[in-house]
Image: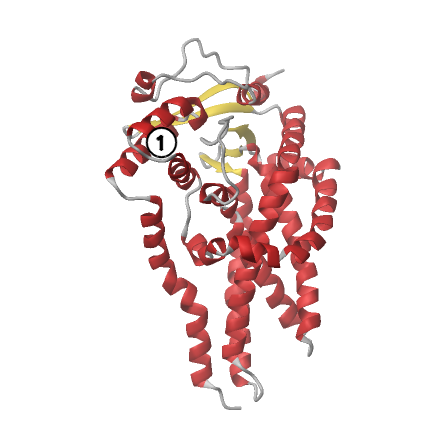
Amino acid sequence: MATDVQGLLWGAGILALPILLALPMRLAWQFWVGIGHEVSEYRTIVRQIVDSGHQVASFSQNLDDIARNLRIPPAKQRLIEAELLHPLTLSHFLLLPALLILPLSAIMALPLILVGFPFMLFMEFLLIRRNFLIWMLKGTERVMHWQVIHIPKPHRGSRATQRSLTEFSQHIEHFNYVPQAAFLGLFAWLIVHWVLNLDSWTIEFIVSAVLYMILLSILSVLNTAFEADLVFVDPAKGRLVPVNQWLEGVLNPVVGIGLVFLLGRNLLEEARDVGGNPILFATVVLTLLYGAAVVGISYRWGYASWRGGKVRQHFEAQVIEQLEPLSYDLTRTKGRIDFNVRMGMNERLTTFEAVNPQQLSFEELQNLPTVPAGTKAPVNPLKRT
């Protein structure tokens, strides 16, 4: 059976378009965020806070004053901070067009989103309310001989800001999780397309959508719960592994290798079939990829706004009750890295919930990192008798 080489090359070229556009999109994004002296100076100050192990909220008043002195508008200020605290990788730039067309495309995807929310509520009940997730976390800690600790990320804490729903700074926070959701949606369709091999594309899309809703519901609940900033400590290998990155390390190779295999196989099959059309197949793949990205960010945004805070607080309460983790600071200055225990996780979260957190002065900002005077390490629960 002859292979449609020309169609195969065109199909491969269409599939390679997002990769070829990723670099220009990255450069365009840097220009969008800003590359001037004022932006660079403000970015350096924020990065200094991040390296110090402090939270940006502790310097909100100083940062607002600095931004005004540098003539950086509040919306641009929040965009710079979001870009630093939630950095975009190559996989994000592959899907960035979905973020640019989000408001209109999210309305078009609304029916699918509404149908999928019951799946998400069921997964929340199973994983969080029925303590299945905390049980898995305790099992992993016991089997792998790891320890769970708490290291808060720099964007934690209460920093009251007035933001428009259309601000890109708000989209970036949720867009950080979208590559997983987008590639998972494409993976679900390719699995159904390969295994069932249905003649009707309509039925194939419906089955794929149901499978995607189930997988996306599980992933969304896990990502929301793991915003508790938990970290696995592996003493044997001397490493720290954030729980959310550990989940990505397990999921990404499976989905990534599966996508490469299924895309290559289906593209070749379309080129070898008499009635096959590799160009149409590649176009459908890109359409589904960006469609899954739109659904993923809409799910993330809606679920985080509606249930995110409650789910995270419920899971944090389970972690504190079952594991009693300590909260640490990880600081870096001039090549030196310090790893200091501060307090229990429960006490640390209480400080974040304060309405008016203590603001550090500009002098303290310039002298970072510092260890607060009188800091007393709590008792390590592993040494209790």
Query: Looking at the image, which residue is at 56% across and 83% down?
Result: 276
Q: Is 205 on the left or on the right of 342, as rendered? A: right
| Residue 252 appears anywhere in the view | no
Q: Is residue 69 above or below residue 360?
A: below
Q: Which one is in front, 128 or 338?
A: 128
Assign the C terminus to one quadrant of the image.
top right
Where residue 123 sits: x, y (%)? Answer: 71, 45
* Mark 1 secondary-structure assignment: helix
Where residue 361 sits: x, y (%)? Answer: 36, 16
Q: Is residue 346 above or below residue 80?
A: above
Q: Residue furthest left?
A: 37
Q: Is 245 on the left or on the right of 209, as rendered? A: left
Q: Residues within 10 Å of mark 1 (few under 14, many from 20)?
A: many
Q: What type is the residue that disc 1 sits on? A: Val
For label 1, the residue is 46
Query: Looking at the image, which residue is at 58% across and 37% down?
Result: 226
Q: Is residue 374 above or below residue 308?
A: above
Q: Is 41 on the left or on the right of 219, as rendered? A: left
Colour scheme employed for the rendering of this structure: secondary structure
Where residue 116 sits: x, y (%)? Answer: 69, 53
Q: Quadrant of residue 214?
A: bottom right
Where residue 342 sits: x, y (%)? Answer: 48, 18
Q: Residue furthest bottom?
A: 1
Q: How many marks?
A: 1
Query: Looking at the image, which residue is at 53% across and 23% down?
Result: 352
Q: Is residue 82 above or below residue 353?
A: below
| Residue 343 appears anywhere in the view | yes
Q: Residue furthest top?
A: 374
Q: Which one is in front, 250 or 276?
A: 276
Q: Quadrant of residue 314?
A: top right
